[in-house]
Image: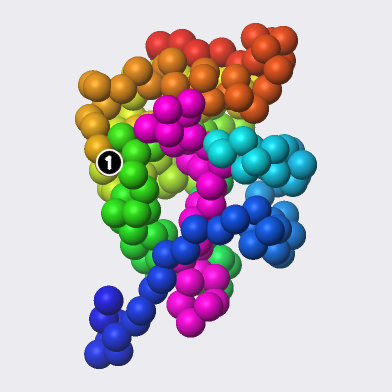
Amino acid sequence: MKVEGVIVDYEIKELNYEAFIPIYNNFMINDFPDDELRSLHSIKRMFRDGRYSVLVMVEDDVLLAYANFITDEDGRVALLDYYAVTQARRGQGIGTLFLQKIRETLDVDGLLIESERPDKAETEEDRITRTKRIGFYEQNDSIITEYTWEAYGVIYNLLYLPIGKDVDNVDVGYKIKEMYGFTLPKSLLEKYTKLYIE
């Protein structure tokens, strides 16, 4: 990539659990509210079971962005669990570039993306933020599916970013339930999640 006549070399790396711990402790705890963060213990279990992965984009070994994924049983569809650009690099097109690099790197049919519904926001500021977030994903070829996904009282649009297969060839509703079923006991899944078409 060229920026104002300077060649910039961004590198995409996949992290193992040990390499991921500093990302969690130094970035994720600041980038996400406590009630949205999975515990390290939970993430470690998913890493161990081969169902969790983390990609980072770095420049000269300096972290620019990170993305965490939960994969389905077949390893063909991934849920975008966390996605963030470091504070110092926000607003510079890094998010768009990283998402493009993810599509080139991941060997999956597509990505499921949960994005909080703007019409369910409690404040105008939150509504604007949610609208921008969905707009970002749509500008990067994500499709808003017909599904609404509710988890622990938060209502999401369920989006799909095609990589290897179009949305018509993936049962998005089944896949989101499958992936949450991997992270939650069945009793909690039934009590705190809901999938519907609205």
Up-down relation of residue 91 to residue 138 (above or below): below
Q: Which residues are magenta?
A: 52-81
The answer to whether 158 appears left or right of 146 in the picture is: right
- Pick the residue in front: 127 or 25: 25
In which image quadrant can residue 16 be found? bottom right
Q: Residue at image x 60%, y 24%?
A: 182
Q: Quadrant of the N terminus?
A: bottom left
Does the magenta-highlighted stretch encompass residue 86? no
- Pick the residue in front: 28 or 44: 44
Q: Amino acid at mark 1?
A: Ile
Q: Is residue 23 visible?
A: no
Which residue is labeled 1 in the image?
A: 163
The answer to whether 115 appears left or right of 138 in the picture is: right
In percent of width and height, residue 91 lies at 44, 66
In percent of width and height, residue 147 lies at 40, 18
Q: Is residue 11 visible?
A: yes
In which image quadrant can residue 38 be found? top right
Does the magenta-highlighted stretch encompass residue 53? yes
In percent of width and height, residue 48 lies at 65, 41
Q: Quadrant of the C terminus?
A: top left
- Pick the residue in front: 78 or 120: 78
The answer to whether 3 appears left or right of 183 in the picture is: left
Q: Residue at image x 48%, y 72%?
A: 58
Classify 10 Å Cα crowding around label 1: few (below 14), some (14-19), many (20 and above).
many
In which image quadrant can residue 181 be found? top right
Up-down relation of residue 117 to residue 94 (above or below): above
Up-down relation of residue 34 to residue 115 (above or below): below
What secondary structure predominates along the stretch shown in magenta?
strand
Q: Residue at image x 31%, y 22%?
A: 170
What's the colour scheme?
A: rainbow
Q: Secondary structure at mark 1?
A: loop
In percent of width and height, residue 92 lies at 40, 70
